[in-house]
Structures are given as structure tokens and as C-alpha cells.
Amino acid sequence: MLRIDLASRVPVYEQIASGLRAELVAGRFGPGDKLPTVRALAIDLGVHHNTVAEAYRELAGEGWLELKRHRGATVQERRAAPNSSEGPEKFTRPLRELLAKALAQGLSRKSLIRELIDSVRRLEEGGL
Amino acid sequence: MTPTLVVRVVLLALGTFSAIMHWFLPRLTRPDLYFAVTVAAEFRDSTAGRLILRQYRRELVRASAVTLALLGTLVLTPAFRIAPLALLLQLGAYFAVYYRARRLVLPNAVAPTTIREARIGTPARQIPGGWMTASGPLALLFACAGYLAAHWQQIPARLVLHFGANGAPNRWAARSIGTAFLPIFIATVILLALTFLLYGMAHWLRPIYAGGFQGEHESRFRRAASIVLLVMEYWIAALFSYLAIRPLLPASLERPPVAIAMVAGLIAIAGSAVLMWLGQGGSRMPSQQRSGTASAGPVGDRTEDRFWKLGVFYFNRDDPAVMVERRFGIGYTVNFAHPIAWIIILLPLLAMVTVTTTIAVRHAVR
């Protein structure tokens, strides 16, 4: 299930890309599987089709999808992640910010650590 | 039963059914929509909510008494041909009553959820029975067209263009391709528009709940609404096929059977009754599960109140959905900001008016 929040400060196309990426990383789609067409997903989410197309392009740029005109998006085998010029800093900073936010909202360090360990374990097992 | 009597009975039945339906309508919508306004789900059962409903029903009874009395009077007199105007007046009065109730609800409006959901990886939604079932009515019409073409020489030189309310022909036209195939053409245009709607209910409509028991109920409701539409399509195809080949039938079958009007009324009433029983979007269907909604707040129908003009007309340029659930009523309406919606509404009307007017003027036989 893909879920977005139109009131969020995170751009909608990023929310769509993140949601789909989570599904792809979790292995819920295999190579050759078709994703909904841009138009169908735009109708279901109530957003402009350009927004969905932007998310699909982002995932295609990461090597997850193959986009063909009038044939929609097909999941493709992703052998290796393309090199990122921004390095791990791109991910560690938002992670630290998220942890700080969770702590500020009253979550205990212990439960946060447990959640992080669980997530890493799921990742190692091939899911998320 | 004479055709005139059948028409009178059908008109009275429609007026009565409309009154009954409007009595129940506020309770048939989704719980967080009240008189087309997004409210907290518990609002309609609160004291304020009940008071508004009581006032609405009081005014509805008054409006019904006046308009049904007028309808009854017209139906029982020789002026029954203008009785459909009483039905229009009834709808106008009901709209005024609804609008007064809506104004009372508006101060209690809350913001609908901003969460949107979509199911990924499930098969695309389909028309019930697939394209084979959906193309059946058109196939029947085309078969009739073929039959007419094959028996062209047997078609009389003068064709009936219009029937009176008593079932007797009252306008004729000279035989031509236009007049002989007129019923086929009109029905084709109507059926194309209805097939567009049918396709739209499968592909141009945003699910309000993508999963859970609400999503399942919604799918069932959508399927039931599609089946009602399909039945109507088959009835229209059967009626117009009969009208098209009527000149080739034995004299005993030339007069339209009185049952035709009754069947139309029965389909409309039975279809509406089934959908009312399910509730808008399947919201009245019983369920064991009462949790798992998309958000803690009111969900509404995933549209914003400001895009609903008078609570009835949905107009949102930024929404790619061509169709949405009606807020006050059962079934679906179109997004009037979408060009396809206008094609569905206007094209068949324009085509039918143009063709029938042209044929009536050019081929009328006195």
C-alpha cells in the first residue's frame, strides 16, 4: 500500500518515490513486474500525473524501473546502485535529525535502538 | 392496463420513490459526510446533527405534500402530459430543503484527511463481466442494423417517428437511411456515453479506501453500481432494437408493449434500492472489523469541501479523477473541471438533438 500526505512538507513526488522504493527494497516486486500507469496512480492519489512521472523518473534514474512510452513502468533487475556523488553524508544527516526529533518527542533511547536494530536485521534478511 | 394508465402509474411511482429516497438519503452517505459537508463521524448522531435531520425531514414532508399533490392532480387529469414538470418541481423543492440543511451543517465542518492511498501490484480494476459483457448491448444494436439493411425493401415508405403517451404513433417520416436507422443511432450514442461511464467507474474513479474492509466494501459497491448500469444498457439496447425493427414486425407487435415503461421504472427503483441498502461506497455494509482506517481524523471522500459547488457539483482542475463519489446521493458524479466529463455529458445530447431535429424537419410527413 502506498500512502502519501498532501499536507506534508516533503514534496509529493519524493513521498511517492520513497514509498515505492520501500516496496522495491522489500522485494515485493520482481524484475518484469509492472507498476500502475502514471495516469492510474495519479488518479488513485489525487495528484497531477507529472508528479507521479517525476517519482517514476527518479526511480528509473536509480536503476529500479524501466520506463517505456505508452507501456508504463516495469521493474528491472538492479545489479548495483549507481555511484552517488554525495556520499554517505546524504543519508546520515537526515537519520541523525530523525533520531533527534524522535528523542525530542519523548521516545526512549532504548526503544529507538531496538527499532534501529530490528530495521538493520530486516535489511540484512533482504526486506525492510 | 392501457399505456396511458401505465405512464400515469410510473410517474406517480417515481414521485413517491423520490420522496422516500430523499427521506433516507442523509443517513445513506458516508458517516463523515453530512449534507455534503465533511464532519466528524460522530456528528450526525449528536444532538445538533439530529436536530438538523429533524428539520430537514419536516421540510421534506411539506415539500412532498405539495409537489405530490400537484403530481397526483396532473396525473389524474387530461393534462397528465405536463406531469413530468411536477417531478422537476419536486426535485427543485428537495434541493432547496437539502440546501437549507447544508447551511446548518457548514459551521460544523472539519478538514478532511490529507492522506491519500493507493494499492500497488493488484490487478487493474475491471468492468464486471469484462468487455464481452459490456459490448453486448452494442452488438445487439449492430445485429439489428444488419437485419434492417438485409430487409430494406420490406420497410414501409412511411415510418413512425414519435409515439404519444397512449402508445399510439403521432408523428411520421418518409423512409430514408436517417429515419430507419434513427433508433439505432440514438441508442448507440446513449450506450457509448454509458459505456464511457462504465469504463470510468473502473478506471477514472479514485478509491477512498485502498485496503481494509472499507476498501472491500467499496469494491462491492462499485461492482453493484456497474451491474445496475449494465442492466440499464441492456434494457436500452432491447428497447431501441425493438423500435428499429418494429416496421418489420407483424401488426400485433407494432404497438410498444405497455410493460416497457414498467420495466424501466422497475430497473430504476430496484437498482436504487440495492445501492441504498449498501449505502454510499458500501458504507452501510456490516463488518466485524471496525479498525484500520487510514487516519485518526475524518477521512471524508478524499476531496476538499471547497471544490464542491453547492455540495453537488465537483469542480477541481488539479484532480485527475474524472469521476468521484457523490456527496449527497448514491453513486457517482463527474469532475466538471475535466474535459472528458463534458464529452460524456454534452456529446450524446448534442448528437441526439441535432439528428432528431434534422430528421423531423426534413423528413416529416403530414
Image (spheres, helix red, strand yellow):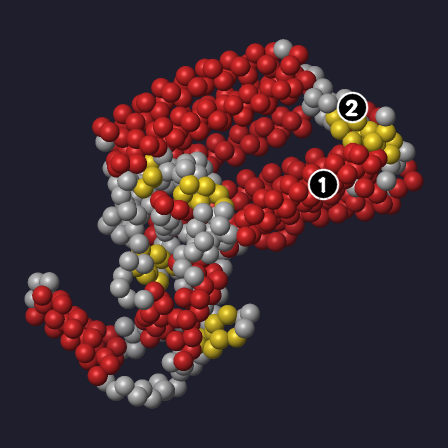
The amino acid on which the numbered mark 1 sits, given as a three-letter code, is: Thr
Residue B114 position within the rendered picture, expressed as x and y whole percent measured from the top left = 31, 54
The disc, 2 or 1, on the residue closer to the chain's N-terminal end is 2
Residue B206 horizontal side relative to residue B126, left or right? left
Q: Residue B238: name its quadrant.
A: top right
Whether B72 is drawn above or below B184: the answer is: above
Q: CA distance from mark 2 to mark 1?
A: 20 Å
Nearer the camera: disc 2 or disc 1: 1
Residue A8 position within the rendered picture, expressed as x and y whole percent measured from the top left = 27, 61
Residue B212 in view of the camera: yes
Residue A48 horizontal side relative to residue B240, left or right? left
**Crowding near the residue tagged with mark 2, few <14, some 14–19, many ≥20 C-alpha atoms within 10 Å:** few
Tell me the residue that label 1 is attached to: B354
**Crowding near the residue tagged with mark 1, few <14, some 14–19, many ≥20 C-alpha atoms within 10 Å:** few
Tell me the residue that label 2 is attached to: B170
The amino acid on which the numbered mark 2 sits, given as a three-letter code, is: Asn
Residue B288 horizontal side relative to residue A75, left or right? left
Where's the C terminus of chain B, which quadrant?
Answer: top right
Residue located at (50% from left, 70% from top): A72
